[in-house]
Amino acid sequence: MADIVTGPLSEMHASEGVCCGEYHGAWVPLRFTNTQREHLAVRHAAGFLDFSFRARIAARGEDHVSFLHNILSNDIKRLRPGQGTYATLLNVKGQIVVDLRVYCETDRILLETDADLREKAWQALERYIVMDDVTLERLDAWGLSVQGPRSRELLVAAGMELPPLAEFDHFNATWSGGPLHITRASSTGEEGYDLWGSAETTRAAWQALQRAAATFEALPCGTEALESLRIEAGIPRYGSELGEDTIPLEAGLLNALSFSKGCYPGQEIVERARSRGHVNWKLVGLTLAGVHVPAPGSKVRAEGKEVGEVTSACFSPTLQKPLALAYLRREFSEPGTPVTVDCAGAAQISLLPFYQRVR
């Protein structure tokens, strides 16, 4: 098992007595005050989070673009500097080895994943480098994220100049004299921005956000709120909904796939599933009728038989009811289908996302 990452923000929070714990390979705040309050701050205004549980790899060299285009599931050659996309690296069975955010710069491509997946991603990428002129580099950078409908306003008030950005667009800026890489990226279903820099720069950015927060009713938030936010938004995470027993179409990851770029590892399996028109298992939402939140792994039953299991669940502060993500057999995945969940009772299949902001 990889060492647990402790970033500069985590160290600062721990010294202030914030409740911290392990999340995807890093020691980060679980909550600052009250999880429901933090969750609702993101839904109604903005929240800022320690993203030390994310990590980056840079790919350089004459062949770095063609190399990544040929092994990742999305179209990398179409990206221009300042653009980005979401992608997966699959095995030959079409199953997800790792999922990645991909950011194109002038002379390199940045690959971002969870901290506990970086070494796995590194080793998987390295195995494909044979004759290609490609160099991989582990980046020593730290992340924080601002999420919510007023996230842009909060960043501007804290001192950041932001140009118009589409999802996964990014640029390099300066904050408190240090370089900062800014990306527009949602992790909650809300507008969001990720900031990456040195220990000193990310600490300075965090402190600036704290000073500006009261004006916007924004709050620092922990990973407990992040989990309920991403479940409401129907966003799958590696280790819960994604893994080497999952193909992207089962998880609904159409935004990670190109169906026109040609071959890559696992492409034949993905294309076969697409041409067939369905997959045998499907990630769905469950709305629970009772008050109990099911544990991951809880079995889902319909017509007296087991038809799937829960992968993630929470009590939704926005909708005020328990919600779950689950993989079910496709014949029981239609929205409105009644099911039961072990130890949680009656439920109904719901469309994902459970929550979607009206733009």
Image (tube, helix red, strand yellow):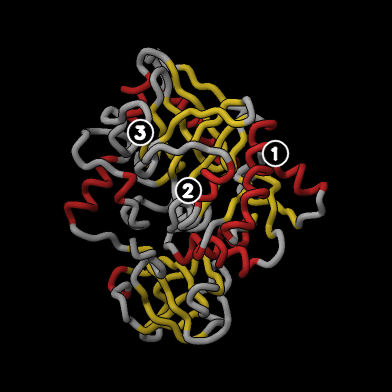
The residue shown at (37%, 57%) is: 251
**Residue 191 visible in rendering:** yes
User: Are the residues tagged 2 and 1 within 8 Å (C-beta)?
Assistant: no
Label 2 CA crowd tier, 10 Å (few <14, some 14–19, many 20+): many
Q: Is residue 36 left or right of residue 287?
A: right
Q: How many marks?
A: 3
- Residue on which disc 3 sits: 83
Quarter of the image where one finds residue 130: top left
User: Are the residues tagged 3 and 1 within 8 Å (C-beta)?
Assistant: no
- Residue on which disc 2 sits: 152
Label 1 CA crowd tier, 10 Å (few <14, some 14–19, many 20+): many
Depicted 44 relative to depicted 9: above or below: below
Residue 145 position within the rendered picture, expressed as x and y whole percent measured from the top left: 55, 46
Q: Is residue 99 left or right of residue 21?
A: left
Q: CA distance from mark 3 to mark 2?
A: 19 Å
Residue 298 position within the rendered picture, expressed as x and y whole percent measured from the top left: 53, 73
Q: CA distance from mark 3 to mark 1?
A: 27 Å
* Mark closer to the observer (3, 2): 2
Nearest the viewer among 59 and 72 is 59
The residue shown at (36%, 51%) is: 247
Q: Check disc 3 and give the amino acid type.
A: Gln
